[in-house]
Amino acid sequence: MQILKNISLKPYNTFGIDATAKHFISVSSLAALQKVLALPDYLEKFILGGGSNMLLTKNLEALVIHLNIKGISVVSETENTVNIKAHAGENWHEFVLWCLEHDFGGLENLSLIPGNVGTAPIQNIGAYGIELKDSFVSCEALEISTGTIKTFDKTACQFDYRNSIFKQEAKGHYVIFSVTFQLTKNNHELHTNYGAISNQLEEMSIKNPTIQDISKAVIAIRQSKLPDPKEIGNSGSFFKNPVISSEAYSILKSQFPDVPGYVISETEVKVPTGWLIEKAGFKGKRFGDYGVHKKQALVLVNYGNAKGSDILKLSELIQHTIQRLFNIQIEAEVNIL
């Protein structure tokens, strides 16, 4: 077990920020993870997964532990469903493709989301009308302070919109090392009504889509809107979509008749942050080596050698402008370090 010094984290975060880890180690087994977490010489430790949901604004003094535990297996199955366990170091999209190759349904709408399996429950990742919690059974997590293993079921995870217990009271206390999903083996429930999936399927001349067709449609849509992190540094959607009261939405609608809104309860409406940012004039704006993507206003980008602090300042400018123009607070979806 070798701990490296002064390692660039540029290859380990999708924003492509060139921050440095003072100490760095990659672990590929639960035993190795337990051993590293128990090291007494490193009081501060930082767990690094796929690096897809974070913005590095400084060098990290902590011991950075890169979670590279891999493996996919069938836990149990019935005539109609199958429970699949995937370990934390598995790439999320590759895991989705593995499920589709075996004709297991439930995750196809979550195709091409960047990141790894282990960080997916933290964020309760979601796209095109589906969230991770819809197929989630449980996750195994290692308690950092004691080295003991705890299983969190769906209730214990306290899932909410882009939120979970791991972003709240359990933040920094646990490391998720495996996640179990329940997927369908037949009679798959298809979700094609959200966003542009139906239109994309029509363009593909598909009238009776399979789960594989839906995945291909989602991939096509995402590739048409979102930059590839390998080409342009980004972390996907930088901000959450705000939920405001129906009364506040009515007032906003009277001022901006074209503002879209999605009713989520009798008293609440979700407003697309991308629309707010575009309306505020930020879409496609470039500030040297960083800016807002030209096709999707929710995505902040690093065109080359931007600093994390530059992107953070841009995000704060956008937040202040949205507050001033629309009287709406928008929250960052990414983890800012």
Image (spheres, rainbow, N blue to C red):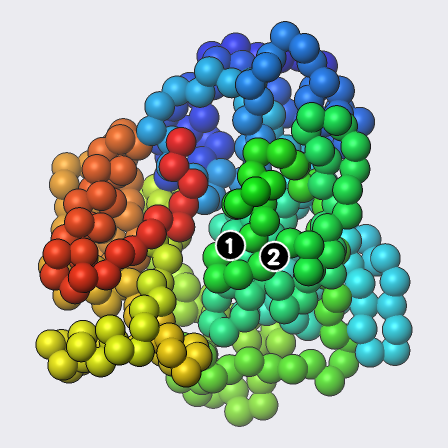
**Horizontally, is 135 left or right of 271 in the view?**
right
Residue shown at the point (43%, 41%) measured from the top left: 335
Expressed as whole percent of the image width and height from the top left, the position of residue 322 reads: 18, 57
Name the foreground residue: 285 vs 336: 336
| Name of the residue lying farthest toward the bottom | 207
Report the Cα–Cα distance between label 1 and label 2: 8 Å
Hey, which quadrant is residue 23 in on the image?
A: top right
Residue type at mark 1 is: Asn
The answer to whether marks 1 and 2 mark residues whose Cβ atoms lie closer than 8 Å is: yes
Name the foreground residue: 149 vs 57: 149
The reply to whether residue 204 is in sight is no
* Residue occupied by mark 2: 158
Hey, which quadrant is residue 276 in on the image?
A: bottom left
Residue 19 vs 278, above or below: the answer is above
Would you call the spot at circle 2 few (<14 residues within 10 Å), some (14-19), or many (20 or more)? some
**Horizontally, is 10 left or right of 256 in the view?**
right
Residue shown at the point (56%, 39%) measured from the top left: 171
| Number of numbered discs | 2
Q: Earlier in the sequence, mark 1 or mark 2?
A: 2
Hey, which quadrant is residue 280 in on the image?
A: bottom left
Name the foreground residue: 268 vs 36: 268
Expressed as whole percent of the image width and height from the top left, the position of residue 205 reads: 47, 87
Q: Quadrant of the C terminus?
A: top left
| Name of the residue lying farthest toward the top | 41
Residue 70 vs 327, above or below: the answer is above
**Which of the labelled discs sits on residue 163, or is there none?**
1
Would you call the spot at circle 1 few (<14 residues within 10 Å), some (14-19), or many (20 or more)? some
Q: Of helix, strand and loop, which one carries label 1?
A: loop
Q: Quadrant of the N terminus?
A: top right
